[in-house]
Image: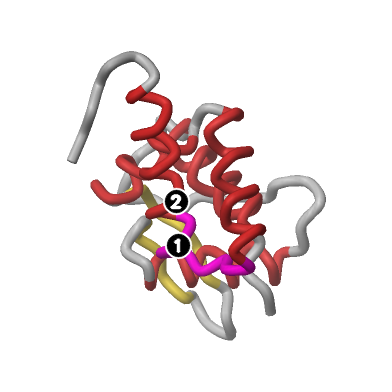
Amino acid sequence: MKLDKDLVREILLALEADDGDPREFKDIEPPGWTPEQVAYTVCILAEGGLIEATDSGGMDWRAQRLTYAGHEYVDTIRDGEVWRKTKEIASKAGVFSLQVLIETGKTVVKQELAKYGVHLP
């Protein structure tokens, strides 16, 4: 199964928006994606260290909360224009791994900040 970068963002934003108990599992059902796609993406996000999640059996991954790294990444890709540029760069490079999306998002934010005279290492 392919990793859908838009679903990655949807899941992360949904977890950030949830104000429930962070110890409880969340039912994330974004429209347009199958439960299998959501479970697979939750699994990958957990493996990537962006969320806490558990496989409740038979590839039924359930998200619980964002990790610190997940919060940082959501801060990077929350803005729609930054997200569009991140996807565009990754698409041109032909690479869609989670790590590439994370690093590309950081680069786009640094470029945007540089426009305002802010330069980060």
How far separated are the C-alphas under marks 2 and 1? 6 Å
Quarter of the figure with residue 39: bottom right
In the rendering, at what x and y percent does residue 87 appear?
61, 49
Residue 24 appears at what percent x and percent y? 39, 50
- Where is residue 89? Give x, y as percent: 58, 51
Is 9 positioned to the left or the right of 69 in the image? Answer: right
Q: Residue shown at 49%/32% (left/top)? A: 78
**100 in the magenta segment:** yes
State the quadrant of the C terminus. Answer: top left
Residue drawn at the location 35% of the way across and 48% of the way down: 70
Tell whether label 1 touches label 2 (CB within 8 Å). yes
Residue 70 covered by magenta stretch: no
Q: Give the farthest residue toward the bottom.
A: 58
Q: What element carries label 1?
A: helix
Up the image or down, 82 lies above or below 66; here it is above
Can you say which quadrant of the picture contains the N terminus?
Answer: bottom right
Number of residues whose C-alpha sits closer than 10 Å to that of mark 2, classed few (under 14), some (14–19) or many (20 or more): many
Q: What element carries label 2?
A: helix
Outermost residue toward the right? 32
Look at label 1 and name its amino acid.
Val
Q: Which region is colored magenta?
A: 94-101
Residue lying furthest left: 121
Using the rendered view, name the quadrant where residue 107 is placed: top left
Amino acid type of the residue tagged 2 in the rendering: Thr
> Which residue is under mark 1?
100
Q: Which mark is residue 92?
A: none
The vertical placement of 93 against 79, above or below, is below
Judging by the rendered image, the residue that carries numbered circle 2 is 104
Q: Mark 1: few, some, or many residues within 10 Å (few <14, many ≥20)?
A: some
Side of 91 where 56 appears, left or right: left
Residue drawn 32% across the image and 63% down it = 49
> Is 104 on the left-hand or right-hand side of 22?
right
